[in-house]
Image (cartoon, rainbow, N blue to C red):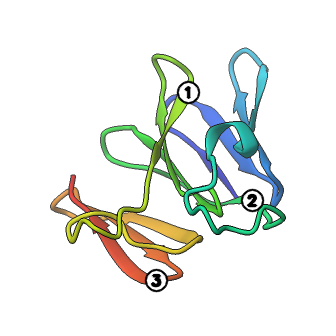
Amino acid sequence: MSLKDSKGMLWIGTGRPYFYKYNTITKKVTTYFLGEIGKPKKPNRNEDAIVRVECIFEDNHNTIWIGTSNAGLLKYSRETDSFTSIVNDPSNNQGLHYNYDITGIFQDSDENIWLSTDDGLVQKQG
């Protein structure tokens, strides 16, 4: 999967724990490793589970979101060129709910972010 964002960056997921950001202006490639970004979210998670990018999305505020298998939801900060991990919180009824996989991301007209997950459809309010 890939996405060309509003800033001219090309984001590329590979089906492996690595993904890339290619700056189409400077021709620079930045490599990201999910093993360093998305730590396992469940203590009983299989450490041998495949960690990979499943989807890449840019919302209407130009925020990049990365949905993964076994590493959660990631929110990109352009200012620091880093990611924040948005964790699964089963104890919070209004929080994100998924087991391991986030396979799709969509934004509705009310600016809510919707995630398709292995535990159903989830809304993250905008």
Q: Position of residue 9 (x, y in %)?
A: 62, 32
Q: Is residue 81 left or right of residue 31?
A: left
User: Which circle's residue, 2 or 3, is located before the other in the chain?
Assistant: 2
Image-quadrant location for residue 56: bottom right
Residue beneath disc 1: 82
Q: Residue at x 43, y 54 (%)?
A: 87
Image-quadrant location for residue 40: bottom right
> Marks 1 and 3, how far apart in space?
27 Å
> Marks 2 and 1, how far apart in space?
18 Å
Most distant residue in the front direction: 43
Q: Position of residue 112 (x, y in %)?
A: 23, 60
Q: Residue at x 56, y 63 (%)?
A: 42
Residue beneath disc 3: 119
User: Which circle's residue, 2 or 1, is located before the other in the chain?
Assistant: 2
> Marks 2 and 3, how far apart in space?
17 Å
Q: Which mark is residue 59?
A: none
Which type of secondary structure does the marked residue at label 3 adopt?
loop
The three-letter code of the residue at mark 3 reads: Asp
User: Which circle's residue, 1 or 3, is located before the other in the chain?
Assistant: 1
Q: Residue at x 64, y 68 (%)?
A: 44
Image-quadrant location for residue 36: top right
Residue beneath disc 2: 51
Q: Residue at x 51, y 70 (%)?
A: 104
| Quadrant (top left/top right/bottom left/bottom right) for the N terminus | bottom right
